[in-house]
Image: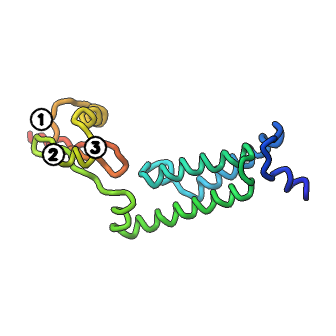
């Protein structure tokens, strides 16, 4: 038992076998954490979801290379995932909490004009928006577009005008 504890203790001079075993366990733990965290973590891509991806990557890597105590890293990772789930539930049930944590969409273009004040608020220039329009709308013709938004996740989306027959 002491050998097992020693095998996963903090050590700056890990051999290949120790790092490989740690890597296997961290891989399996990460898979479990992703399942616990839910599809939201890797699908929606809001700032909250990006935080969990960055934190888990940074923290779990410490367990593989032995910079931090192995079991403390695993425990911390579970706490972060549970916190993410809690925040996800709060976002679902409270519009005010969602607005505080994730912000709200900002309209950037309406009635044929860019809304300069909202461009400043979103810290975007017209070319940034046009890049999003070309990507999501396959057009550069602003006359075809009714509204353009920057969504809470930072994606630029647009609504085309209705073409009456």
Q: CA distance from mark 2 to mark 3?
A: 12 Å
Task: Give the residue at x 81% y 41%.
Answer: 14
Q: CA distance from mark 3 to mark 1?
A: 24 Å
* Residue 63: numbered disc: none
Q: Tell me the SS state at disc 3.
A: loop
Residue 16: which quarter of the image? Answer: top right
Residue 128: which quarter of the image? Answer: top left
* Viewer-proximal residue among 144 and 50: 50
Where does residue 161 sit, x and y in percent of width and height? 15, 42
Q: Which residue is mark 3?
A: 123
In the drawing, does residue 77 fall left or right of residue 110?
right
Task: Give the residue at x 25% y 37%.
Answer: 129
Whether label 2 touches label 1, CB < 8 Å:
no
In the drawing, does residue 157 fall left or right of residue 1?
left
Crowding near pointer 1: few (<14 within 10 Å), some, many (20+)?
few
Dot 2 or dot 1: first in sequence order is 2
Crowding near pointer 3: few (<14 within 10 Å), some, many (20+)?
few
Of tags 2 and 3, the one toward the viewer is 3
Q: Tell me the SS state at disc 1.
A: helix
* Residue 143: numbered disc: 1
Dot 3 or dot 1: first in sequence order is 3
Dot 2 or dot 3: first in sequence order is 2
Task: Give the residue at x 78% y 51%.
Answer: 10
Of tags 3 and 1, the one toward the viewer is 3
Q: Which residue is mark 2?
A: 115
Quarter of the C terminus within the rendering: top left
Q: Tell me the SS state at disc 2.
A: loop
Where does residue 98 sit, x and y in percent of width and height? 37, 63
Image colouring = rainbow
């Amino acid at each position: 038992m002491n050998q097992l504890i020693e095998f996963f203790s903090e050590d700056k001079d890990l051999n290949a076998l120790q790092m490989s075993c740690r890597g296997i366990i961290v891989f399996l733990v990460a898979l479990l954490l992703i399942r616990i965290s839910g599809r939201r973590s890797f699908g929606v891509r809001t700032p909250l979801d990006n935080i969990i991806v960055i934190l888990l990557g940074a923290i779990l890597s410490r367990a593989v290379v032995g910079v931090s105590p192995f079991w403390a890293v695993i425990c911390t990772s579970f706490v972060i995932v549970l916190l993410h789930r809690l925040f996800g539930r709060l976002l679902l049930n409270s519009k005010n909490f969602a607005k505080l944590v994730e912000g709200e969409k900002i309209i950037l273009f309406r009635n044929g004009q860019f809304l300069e004040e909202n461009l400043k608020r979103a810290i975007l220039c017209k070319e940034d928006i046009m890049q999003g329009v070309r990507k999501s709308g396959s057009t550069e013709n602003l006359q075809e577009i009714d509204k353009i938004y920057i969504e809470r996740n930072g994606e630029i989306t647009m609504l085309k005008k209705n073409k009456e027959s």
